[in-house]
Image (tube, rainbow, N blue to C red):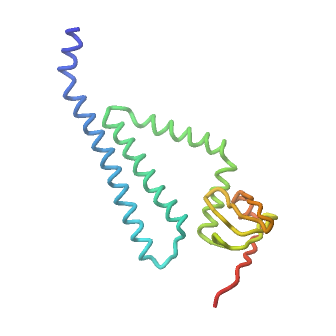
Amino acid sequence: MSNLVNWFIDQGPQIGLRLGGALLIILGGRLLGILAVRVAGRLMDISQLEFSELLRQFIYKLIRWALTGIALIMALGQLGVEIGPLIAGLGVAGFILGFAMQQTLSNFAAGFMLLLYRPYDVGDPIEAAGASGIVGEMNMVNTTMQTEEGTVITIPNGKIWGGVIKNKREKTS
C-alpha cells in the first residue's frame, strides 16, 4: 500500500498536468470549432455564391468534426499515447470502411455534386431515375419525393446523378 502511495505522490502531479493539458486541448479545439463555423458562415454570407442550407450544414459539420478529431489526437499525444501508429491504424480502418461502404460513398459523392450544381431544389416537381414527383427532402445520400398518387419514394442520389434529371418547375422571369 505504501508503494502505491509513494507512486501517486511521485507521479500524481505529472499525471494531473497531462490530464489538465489534454482537457485544455479538447476545450480549445471545441472553441476553435465554434469560431471557425461562425467565420465560415460569415464568409458564405458575403460570398457571391449562393450556398444551399444543406451545403452550409455539411460544411459546418465537416469543420466541427475535423477540428474535434485533430484536438482529440493532440490530447492523446499530450497524455503520452503514441499517435503515429494510431493515425496509421485510422488510415487502414478508413481504407477498409471505404471498400465496405462503396455504394454509400458513391451516393454521398453524388449528393455533393447535386448540392453544387443544384439541378433541383426542395419543392420542385422533377422526373429522375424513372420516377416523378415533388421533391420533399434531400440529404447527402438520398432524395425523397412524393408522387402524384401521394406515395413517398426515396431514391439514392447516385441513381439520380447518373441519369437524366427533368426539372418541371416554371421559370420565373
Quadrant of the image containing the N terminus: top left
**Which residue in the rendered view is the most extreme toward the top?**
1
Which is nearer the eye, 133 or 3? 133
Q: Is residue 126 above or below residue 11?
A: below
Tell me where residue 134 sits by quadrant.
bottom right
- Report x, y in % for residue 13: 19, 28
Tell me where residue 115 sits by quadrant.
bottom right
Tally of numbered tags: 0
- Report x, y in % for residue 136: 66, 65
Quadrant of the image containing the C terminus: bottom right
Q: Is residue 137 above or below residue 9?
A: below
Q: Is residue 158 left or right of residue 95?
A: right
Q: Is residue 57 left or right of residue 71?
A: right
- Report x, y in % for residue 125: 72, 73
Tell me where residue 127 sits by quadrant.
bottom right
Residue occupying image coordinates x 25% and y 29%: 15
- Report x, y in % for residue 150: 77, 64
**Which residue in the rendered view is the most extreme toward the front?**
150
Residue occupying image coordinates x 45% and y 50%: 65
Residue occupying image coordinates x 50% and y 61%: 57
